[in-house]
Amino acid sequence: MKVELQSRKGLRTILSVFVDKKSIEEKIKEKLVELQTQVNLKGFRPGKVPPELIKKQFGKAVYGEVIDAILKETSSKAIAEKKIKIAGQPKIDLKTFGEGKDLNYELQIDALPDIKLQSLDKFKVIEYKVQIEKKIVEKKLDEIASEHKNFIDKKNSEKADTGNQVIFDYEISVDGKKIENGEGKGIQLELGKDLFIKGFDAQLVGVKKNDIKNVKVKLPENFPQKSLANKNANFVCKILNVKIGEKSKLDDEFAKKFGAKDLQDLKSLIEKQIVNQYQQALEAITKKQILDQLEKNHTIDLPKNLVDHELNIMTQNIKEEDKKKHRQQNEKLAKSRIKLGLILNEYGEKNNLTVSEAEVQNEINKQVRGMQGQEKFILEYYKKNPMALQSIKGSLYEEKIINSIKLKTKLTKKEITDKEAESLIKNFNNLENPQKSNSEKLEEVKKSRAKSKKISKK
């Protein structure tokens, strides 16, 4: 094999690779000998088929397989010989090839840039710590008490109102026929929350114990039996009981239902949860400060193929008209992501930062602990999805790099109130997502608030 430099312009290098026909013929002979043990032809014992006959029958396929193997082997050697750090998959352009001929091809390579890391001494970074007012914790505690009511039986003659709990069995029929596995026992619904099937619990308002009620609804898209999704169905509901809810008394016994030692411990858990939710967003702001300064203080030539690939990933689910409308902005963002990725990776390599398998497993265990009842599903998911494991590893690696950089900057620790935190987070989100509509941003705020209200039973 001979390798010659054809051209080098910026990060793009073109190599000419030459493999003589004698080397190719030797590889073909080796392959034919290998096939002797695999090919069965009438009139010949296993392993005794002459190579010449195999070549006559399978010559073109053998040549193609050998050339593919030679291209992979020689291109890797050529890149290693020239000490090029490749960015993406190189392109191969065949110039001369064919049975009985030398092989000559061009290897077009986009290389990773050389990165000279700049000093971090002048970086200014603010790390925020939020202080939560006691009245916010008390408000959240009151909301939890309202959401987790004590339900007591109503009189048999009393009808169910919105806010009451109805307990019932049901059978489902579609087009007058009962469906397979279409039964439910002891279902509990708090009327007005609409948590079962949209429009279902509203039809139970007014029922009494021992009533039989027909509830007509459209089955949801995610109904287990796909053939019945979005079809009109009738639920024959036998009402077992109707209960009225009373706000739970805030005492130590109530707190123990949530895994707390006592009421004061529950307040501490709630405060910690609220603080953690703020801190996650505030850490993103601190991280952005670091990334902005890294990007500003480094000048790097970017491999076009990496930028194009990132842009394609970013816009793959966007309409063509929106792609054109925001093309300049999206290209800028794609370049920023690639640039920062290269800088962070260089920093990680220079500082020998790595992520161990134990750290990845520890992160998975955290997820398992946070999703009770779904432990088996989560573990199976990561077992069957290597890319998901790589994603965790990548996130941990980036987090480790950012934390290492933070230690080398001028770090200012600042305590802020929850109102100041909300203002910072709101401004940050507006800057990060300028293309999002007001309705989308409002929906995100609603989700965030809903999330902050949740506290899981242990």
Image (cartoon, rainbow, N blue to C red):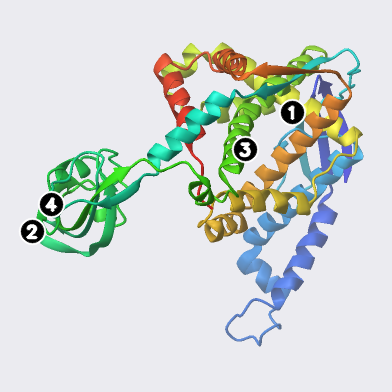
Q: Nearer the viewer, mark 4 or mark 2?
A: 4
Name the kind of residue labelled 4 in the image. Answer: Lys
CA separation in Å, label 2 and label 3 = 54 Å
Q: CA distance from mark 1 to mark 3?
A: 39 Å
Judged left or right of residue 347, residue 288 is: left
- Cα distance between the residues tagged 4 and 2: 25 Å
Q: Mark 3 falls on what kind of element?
A: helix
Q: Which corner quadrant of the image does residue 96 belong to?
A: top right
Q: Nearer the viewer, residue 293 or 166?
A: 166
Work out whether residue 421 can be spotted.
yes
The residue carrying mark 2 is: 176
Q: Position of residue 387 (x, y in %)?
A: 63, 48
Nearer-N-terminus badge (3/4): 4
Identified at 64% across, 22% down, the residue is: 334
Q: Which mark is residue 268?
A: 3
The residue depicted at 74 percent of the width and 16 percent of the height is 292
Q: Nearer the viewer, residue 63 or 321?
A: 321
